[in-house]
């Protein structure tokens, strides 16, 4: 029978803790990604946040700006500033939604496509560095397990939001 160690035991075994370790790994991945992007001739000035927005627009081409802010879990004004920056670089354009004059749909421009390839190259190199020394099955297991953690937390967040709406 597997027993979950008491919180104190787990903390002594790993003083970083799960949340701290995840946050630190994310910070280091952003740093490595930023360094890799600075070496990319097509987009040395793109920040990780701008790269993330470009990638999400690519995944959800034509999405409403507000819906994209929800997907990214950022404030609409934060996304508006990032989209303004990307539009000024000629990478993104806002198009009016014919069904709602107040809403904007986000689209990539032709200039964004090569930059997306650079973002993907840099992301792959960053992943390669992060997973260096892992056997392929270990890397796959880690990604699977992190996906399950994300699913657990996303489900819990949806449950909390639904409960708040009922209150």
Image: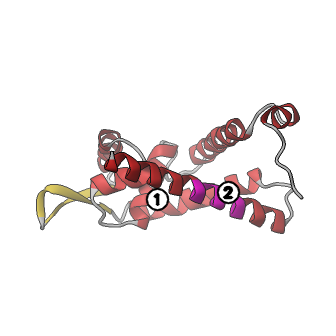
Contact? badges 1 and 2 (CB < 8 Å): no
| Residue 130 highlighted magenta (yes or no) | no
Q: Which mark is residue 148?
A: none
Classify the position of the C terminus by image quarter. Answer: top left
| Tally of marks | 2
Q: Residue at x 42, y 56 (%)?
A: 54
Mark 2 crowd level (few <14, some 14–19, many ≥20, 10 Å Cα):
few
Judged by its main secondary structure, the magenta piece is: helix
What is the CA distance from the residue labelled 1 to the residue labelled 2? Answer: 20 Å
- Of residue 9 and residue 3, the one placed in the foreground of this image is 3
Locate residue 122 relative to residue 93 in the image: left or right. Answer: right
Residue 51 appears at what percent x and percent y?
Answer: 48, 51
Q: Which residues are magenta?
A: 143-152
Q: Quadrant of residue 128?
A: bottom right
Q: Which mark is residue 55?
A: 1
Classify the position of the N terminus by image quarter. Answer: bottom right
Locate residue 84 relative to residue 99 in the image: left or right. Answer: right
Tag nearer the camera, 1 or 2:
2
Q: Residue at x 38, y 66 (%)?
A: 60
Secondary structure beneath dot 1 equals: helix
Mark 1 crowd level (few <14, some 14–19, many ≥20, 10 Å Cα):
some
Q: Residue at x 55, y 58 (%)?
A: 118
Q: Earlier in the sequence, mark 1 or mark 2?
A: 1
Residue 53 appears at what percent x and percent y?
Answer: 42, 52
Which residue in the structure is indicated by mark 2? 146
Please, which residue is most extreme toward the left here?
A: 101
Residue 75 appears at what percent x and percent y?
Answer: 35, 41
């Amino acid at each position: 029978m597997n027993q979950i160690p008491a919180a104190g035991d787990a903390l002594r075994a790993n003083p970083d803790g799960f949340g701290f370790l995840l946050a630190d790994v994310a910070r280091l991945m952003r740093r490595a990604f930023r360094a890799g992007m600075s070496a990319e001739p097509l987009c040395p000035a793109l920040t990780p946040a701008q790269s993330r927005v470009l990638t999400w627009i690519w995944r959800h081409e034509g999405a409403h700006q507000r819906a994209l802010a929800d997907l990214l879990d950022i404030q609409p004004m934060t996304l508006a500033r990032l989209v303004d920056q990307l539009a000024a670089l000629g990478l993104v354009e806002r198009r009016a939604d014919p069904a709602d004059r107040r809403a904007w749909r986000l689209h990539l421009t032709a200039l964004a496509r090569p930059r997306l390839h650079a973002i993907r190259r840099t992301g792959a190199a960053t992943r390669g560095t992060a997973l260096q020394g892992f056997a392929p099955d270990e890397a796959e297991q880690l990604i699977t397990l992190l996906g399950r953690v994300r699913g657990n937390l996303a489900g819990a967040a949806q449950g909390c939001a639904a409960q708040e709406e009922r209150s």
